[in-house]
Image: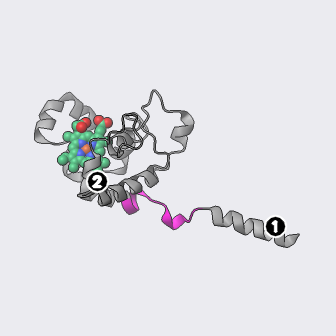
């Protein structure tokens, strides 16, 4: 009987994902971001509200909004711009119209690299869904990982 419990305990342990595999902003995402996103979303880019105020001028310069720190990036995952990161990076498999988000192409120079980096972002976010604040549920938000 004791062995049965031991075996069950071992099986339960084996089902727990290995911690070392966990994707964090500081360990992985910040580096991917630095390589593929920072040119337009770095510290020289405006805060989101300032970007919106003068959108046409920023677009002319080809610059987006600031997103290069953990604190600047999270609002585009959870709130207030819920799902924005996911909508923009998705390859089309998660969207209703099947079209990739317009930042997907920045994830890499070829499809293999884009898919690899998308997989990393998906793992980091955890609950990858493209819903906006008005549609996302509390439990969906609760299942976001986005570890520092
Ligand atoms: C060549 C410049 C450029 C690069 C590189 C780039 N972006 Fe963008 N991004 C923009 C611009 C400009 C906008 C604003 C226009 C728009 O909404 O499409 C934007 C908008 C966004 C938005 C939407 C924010 C919102 O809610 O309005 C997200 C999210 C985003 N980018 C994420 C990324 C990520 C992640 C990367 C790296 C994989 C990236 N971008 C790479 C220029 C860029």
What residue is shown at x 14% (from left), y 31% (from top)? 56
Name the foreground residue: 134 vs 74: 134
Quarter for ligand 1? top left
Name the foreground residue: 51 vs 119: 119
- Which secondary structure, mark 1? helix
Q: Is residue 31 in sight in this rendering?
A: yes
Q: Decide: few, some or many residues near mark 1? Use Cα within 10 Å; few <14, some 14-19, many ≥20.
A: few
Mark 2 near ligand 1 (CB under 8 Å)? yes
Q: Which residue is mark 1?
A: 5
Q: Is residue 16 left or right of residue 122?
A: right
Q: Is residue 58 left or right of residue 93?
A: left
x and y percent of residue 28 in the render? Answer: 38, 61
* Residue 96 falls within the magenta-colored stretch: no
Disc on res. 89: none
Q: Decide: few, some or many residues near mark 2? Use Cα within 10 Å; few <14, some 14-19, many ≥20.
A: many
Residue extending farthest to the bottom is: 3
x and y percent of residue 47 in the render? Answer: 26, 38
The residues colored magenta run 17-28
Q: Is residue 43 in sight in this rendering?
A: no
Q: Which residue is mark 2?
A: 107
- Which secondary structure, mark 2? helix
Q: Earlier in the sequence, mark 1 or mark 2?
A: 1
Quadrant location of the N terminus?
A: bottom right
Would you place residue 117 above or below residue 52 in this image? below
Name the foreground residue: 92 vs 61: 92
Mark 1 near ligand 1 (CB under 8 Å)? no
What residue is shown at x 35% (from left), y 46% (from top)? 91
Residue extending farthest to the right is: 1
Quadrant location of the C terminus?
A: bottom left
Q: Is residue 79 left or right of residue 38?
A: right
């Amino acid at each position: 009987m004791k062995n049965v419990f031991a075996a069950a305990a071992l099986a339960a342990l084996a089902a727990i994902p290995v911690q070392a595999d966990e994707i964090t902003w500081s360990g992985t995402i910040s580096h991917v971001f630095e390589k593929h996103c920072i040119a337009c979303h770095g510290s020289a880019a405006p805060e989101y509200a300032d970007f919106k105020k003068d959108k046409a001028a920023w677009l002319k310069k080809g610059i987006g909004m600031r997103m290069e720190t953990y604190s600047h990036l999270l609002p585009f995952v959870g709130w207030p711009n819920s799902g924005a990161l996911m909508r923009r990076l998705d390859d089309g498999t998660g969207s209703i119209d099947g079209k990739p988000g317009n930042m997907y192409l920045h994830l890499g120079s070829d499809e293999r690299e884009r898919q690899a980096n998308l997989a990393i972002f998906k793992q980091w976010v955890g609950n990858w869904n493209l819903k906006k604040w008005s549609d996302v549920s509390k439990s969906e938000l609760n299942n976001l990982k986005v570890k520092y």
